[in-house]
């Protein structure tokens, strides 16, 4: 198995853990390259698995680095939540030999293309987590129009709007009141952020459609944020489109790690509340 090792050298512990894990990985696989500065064009490399050290942000950046040559990713969590990177370093050491032997499940996930006008040219960026159109002024709301396959669906005023594939449904969209989507579902969730209305609700729709978000505010400015990593200023009349990408993201899941277990472990989903106060239980 040919492996590349990715991470962000500016994050605490990434360099140290890479140095510690590299000899262990090299015992079982061929290490093609190590990129801790996120500068390598991964689309031109020939490898089987990308081992990403860090958190979910490092995995999102790795997916974008691979561009339209997506390869399976094995995430190792060195951050906080680690919803995509569900192995710690000790677990990696215990299961890596089995991964090399093919003892894992490969999950496939929807990616998107986000397109907007960059000056006189159109620019398209591949993403995995979310497209956010948001006000860039904390004291001002913005007016937005949402279109689906050319039909003007709705207009509203608020802080912004999210379009997320299933992987992004457990991120900013969840915090904004959106639903959790099964990660291998072929759909987008559209989530308003602090809409100034009593009837605005998140919507789940087919990924086969194209979504357009237009900024119609006369005065307030907006910003386009892609996967929390690309920030592009928007002006009145500018339009952002989101559609399914022709490639998908592949995530390695080892035995004992599942989507629902991650929901329970990371987000406390389904855990029964403690109805009795501790001092009552002690009586």
Image (cartoon, rainbow, N blue to C red):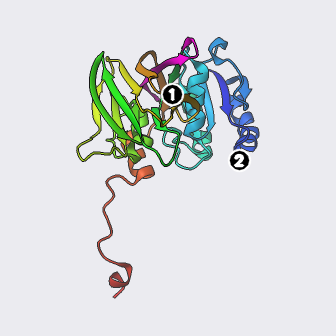
Q: Where's residue 195, x and y in %?
A: 34, 43
Q: Is residue 27 above or below residue 91?
A: above
Q: Where's residue 88, x and y in %?
A: 58, 45
Q: Where's residue 170, x and y in %?
A: 41, 41
Q: Does the rendering let one see residue 239?
A: yes
Question: Which comes before the other along the chain, label 2 or label 1?
Answer: 2
Q: Does the rendering let one see residue 171?
A: no
> Which residue in the rendered view is the most extreme toward the left?
199
Task: For the N terminus, give its image quadrant.
Answer: top right
Judge left or right: residue 250 versus residue 193: right
Query: Judging from the image, what secondary structure is the residue with disc 2 in?
Result: loop
> Which residue in the rendered view is the most extreme toward the bottom?
283
Residue that label 1 marks: 235
Residue 191's quadrant in the figure? Answer: top left
Residue 211's quadrant in the figure? Answer: top left
Q: Which residues are magenta?
A: 104-122
Query: Which disc is residue 12 wearing?
Result: 2
């Amino acid at each position: 198995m040919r492996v590349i090792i990715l991470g962000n050298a500016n994050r605490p512990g990434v360099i140290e853990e890479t140095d510690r894990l590299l000899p262990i990985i090299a015992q079982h696989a061929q290490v093609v390259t190590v990129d801790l500065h996120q500068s390598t064009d991964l689309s031109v490399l020939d490898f089987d698995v990308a081992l990403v050290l860090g958190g979910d942000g490092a995995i999102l950046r790795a997916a974008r680095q691979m561009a339209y040559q997506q390869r399976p990713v094995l995430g190792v969590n060195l951050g906080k939540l680690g919803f995509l990177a569900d192995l710690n370093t000790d677990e990696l050491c215990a299961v890596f030999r089995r991964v090399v032997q093919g003892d894992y499940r490969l999950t496939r996930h929807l990616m998107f293309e986000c397109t907007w006008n960059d000056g006189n040219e159109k620019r398209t960026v591949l993403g995995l987590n979310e497209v956010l159109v948001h006000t860039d002024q904390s004291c001002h709301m913005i007016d937005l129009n949402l279109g689906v396959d050319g039909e003007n669906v709705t207009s509203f005023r608020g802080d912004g709007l999210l379009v997320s594939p299933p992987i992004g449904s457990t991120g900013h969209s969840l915090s904004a009141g959106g639903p959790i989507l099964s990660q291998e579902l072929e759909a987008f969730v559209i989530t308003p952020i602090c809409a100034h209305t009593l009837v605005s609700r998140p919507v789940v729709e087919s990924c086969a459609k194209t979504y357009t978000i237009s900024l119609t505010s006369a005065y307030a400015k907006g910003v386009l944020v892609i996967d929390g990593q690309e920030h592009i200023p928007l002006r009145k009349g500018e339009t952002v489109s989101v559609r399914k990408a022709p490639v998908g993201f592949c995530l390695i899941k080892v035995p004992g790690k599942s989507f629902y277990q991650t929901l329970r472990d990371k987000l406390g989903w389904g855990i029964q509340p403690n109805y009795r106060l501790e001092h009552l239980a002690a009586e």
